[in-house]
Image (cartoon, coloured by chain):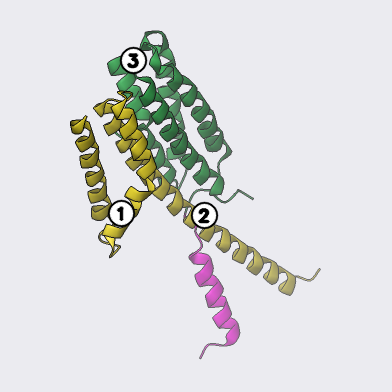
Amino acid sequence: MADKKSLLKELLTEISDIVKKEAGDYLKDTDSIAGKFLKANQSDLEKLIFELSQDELSEKDIASIVRGKKSLLEMKALTKKGLSQAKIDSIQNQILDLIKNKVVSTFLPK
Amino acid sequence: MLKPAKHLTFFFLFFILNCSPRIARFNETAYQNAINLKIESLRLMDNAVDSIGSHIKEVSDLEMKIEKAHQYVMWLPRNELTVKQWEVLMKPDGGLLGEFLSRWKEEKVLNKGYVKASKILVEQAFNEIIKLETGKVKPQ
């Protein structure tokens, strides 16, 4: 059991390192970011440790689930980026419509 | 000195030239594919507590459908983010659907706790694809 727990801790440290590595160029306080990530996942991790102790999950399962959580973070980041781009597109369309309508109503008599 | 009307013309021209869309428009087929494959994947994952023998055709059908959905979004212009999401979902060592199916094929049977935890992750991953698609600008 001690080995399983240490495996989990190692995986968490590695995730924390990834956050630092990926965000390091853009953010100053990477320790805080990594800390927040660990805190947000704390209840899930406690559940995983419990399931490990009950032999419901193997070490391989835990490693896979942690990889899945990391991939999910990547997918969320892609969604966030895409939604920001879509918002800018939507604003541009509204401005273009406004320009088009103004020009038509100003220069083309009804 | 440019007259005000000319300033305005230059502004409009500059604005219009910089107005190419940043991301693909909402696509009904891409959206439907994501919804249908989410339901189909979660249903099939439940069966991973049984031996893969009787489900091997369903697994290969699902992989084929997902590849088709991936190819479909790949040919839509400015759709790189959605394409990347499908690739993350199906990565063989990404801890999501791709890894789940690989492990099932390799290990024949997966344990209940892992199936349950993976289903939550895969459902959330599909939700991200759906959320991005529905957030795109609708075609006029």
Q: Residue furthest left?
A: A3
Determine the residue positioned at 28% across, 16% down.
B107
- Name the element at disc 2: helix
> x and y percent of residue B20 in the render?
49, 59
Q: Which residues are magenta?
A: B1-22
Q: Is residue A51 visible?
A: yes
Determine the residue positioned at 34% across, 38% down.
A46
Determine the residue positioned at 58% across, 38% down.
B28
Q: To which residue does mark 3 refer?
A: B109
Q: Nearer the viewer, residue B96 or B16?
A: B96
Q: Please determine if labels 2 and 1 lie on a single subunit.
A: yes
- Name the element at disc 1: helix
Sort mark 3 into few (<14), some (14-19) or many (20+) by Cα contacts within 10 Å: some
Instruction: Pinpoint the chain carrying mark 2.
Output: A
Q: Which mark is residue A86?
A: 2
Vertical comparison of B14 with A74: above or below? below
Instruction: Locate the C terminus of chain A by quadrant.
Output: bottom right
> x and y percent of residue B117 in the render?
39, 30
Give yes or no for residue B18 being in the magenta stretch.
yes
Q: Which-is-in-front pick, marks 1 and 3?
A: 1
Res B108 quadrant in image? top left
Q: Which mark is residue A35?
A: 1
Q: CA distance from mark 2 to mark 1?
A: 31 Å
Q: Please determine if labels 1 and 3 lie on a single subunit.
A: no
- Chain coloured green: B
Mark found first going from the N terminus, 2 or 1: 1
Instruction: Locate the N terminus of chain A by quadrant.
Output: top left
Sort mark 1 into few (<14), some (14-19) or many (20+) by Cα contacts within 10 Å: few
> x and y percent of residue B118 in the render?
39, 29
